[in-house]
Image: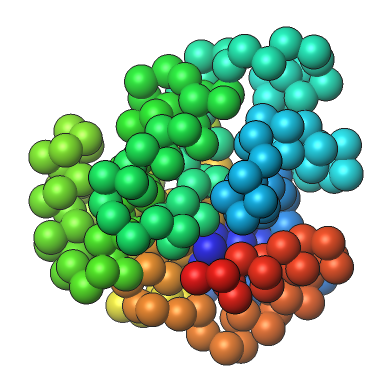
């Protein structure tokens, strides 16, 4: 899951100031974790301790009220209604990476992804986005090649992953839906030469940069096996003590 956090932090400063190029400094003083990281760590804690994910989402929302949440999630977290709100936003896909590392069976990963999504994102597209990303991570860490991952995701979930980054980039704009960002994050991963190049691909598309890079980074970590040490060090340096403690505990449990 560290790859997801790296993508979130690297993409954070470009979310509202898109950068349609792969040429940029990976980290600056403006680089910070956002709601993508907060939700991912909450899910990791839920898996570790067996606490309801919805309960932890609200707890983390209180702890990190300014992390940049979407309006509908913010209203849900502040309200008293535990029912999901039918979202097909990419929040379900950005936060799912812990599931893909916690379980050692593809069907268990898919079911875990579904459970993590439906707390808030119970629309079929919201569930599909989470399951596709979790499956992609799991298949990558299990030794599948990129073509095998592409074929599985296209056949199982119906995403069209045939476009190239160069064809997407010129007209791509901010899209926070699963259907408008999950395929693009997969393509950034498929065209990436290594972990860092994958994140540069994702940011270069523009759009919802932190979430695109978060998803692409989670896929790249599964496939390449680890986050490069220099990037990981920058991530650890930007997490507070509480988040870092949960992440370390999760990584030790794998």
Query: In the rendering, at what x and y percent does residue 6 appear?
Result: 59, 67
Which residue is at the front of the view, 80 or 129? Answer: 80
Which residue is at the front of the view, 89 or 113? Answer: 113
Residue projecting furthest to the front: 50
Left or right of 87? Residue 242 is: right
Query: In the rendering, at what x and y percent does residue 2 appear?
Result: 57, 68
Query: In the rendering, at what x and y percent does residue 66 appear?
Result: 85, 41
Looking at the rendering, which quadrant does residue 103 occupy? bottom left
Which residue is at the front of the view, 213 or 139? Answer: 139
Q: What residue is shown at x 47% (from left), y 33% (from top)?
A: 115
Query: In the rendering, at what x and y percent does residue 27 appear?
Result: 68, 74
Can residue 32 be seen here? The reply is no
Left or right of 204? Residue 81 is: right
Q: Is residue 11 above or below residue 85?
A: below
Looking at the rendering, which quadrant does residue 74 occupy? top right
Can residue 60 be seen here? The reply is yes
């Amino acid at each position: 899951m560290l790859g997801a956090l790296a993508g979130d932090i690297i993409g954070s400063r470009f979310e509202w100031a898109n950068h349609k190029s792969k040429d940029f400094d990976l980290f600056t003083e403006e680089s910070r974790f956002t709601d993508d990281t907060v939700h991912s760590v909450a899910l990791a804690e839920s898996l570790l301790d067996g606490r309801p994910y919805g309960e932890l989402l609200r707890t983390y929302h209180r702890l990190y009220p300014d992390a940049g949440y979407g309006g509908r999630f913010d209203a849900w977290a502040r309200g008293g209604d535990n029912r999901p709100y039918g979202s097909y936003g990419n929040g379900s896909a950005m936060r799912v990476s812990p599931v893909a590392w916690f379980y050692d069976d593809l069907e268990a990963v898919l079911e875990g992804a579904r459970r993590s999504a439906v707390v808030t994102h119970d629309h079929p597209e919201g569930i599909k986005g989470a399951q596709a990303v979790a499956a992609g991570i799991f298949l990558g860490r299990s030794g599948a090649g990129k073509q095998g991952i592409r074929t599985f995701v296209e056949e199982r979930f119906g995403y069209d992953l045939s476009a190239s980054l160069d064809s997407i980039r010129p007209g791509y704009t901010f899209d926070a839906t699963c259907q408008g960002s999950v395929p693009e994050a997969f393509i950034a991963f498929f065209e990436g030469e290594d972990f860092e190049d994958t994140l540069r691909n994702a940011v270069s598309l523009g759009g919802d940069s932190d979430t695109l890079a978060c998803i692409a980074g989670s896929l790249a970590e599964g496939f390449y096996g680890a986050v490069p040490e220099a990037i990981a060090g920058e991530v650890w340096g930007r997490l507070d003590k509480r988040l870092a403690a949960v992440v370390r505990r999760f990584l030790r449990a794998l």
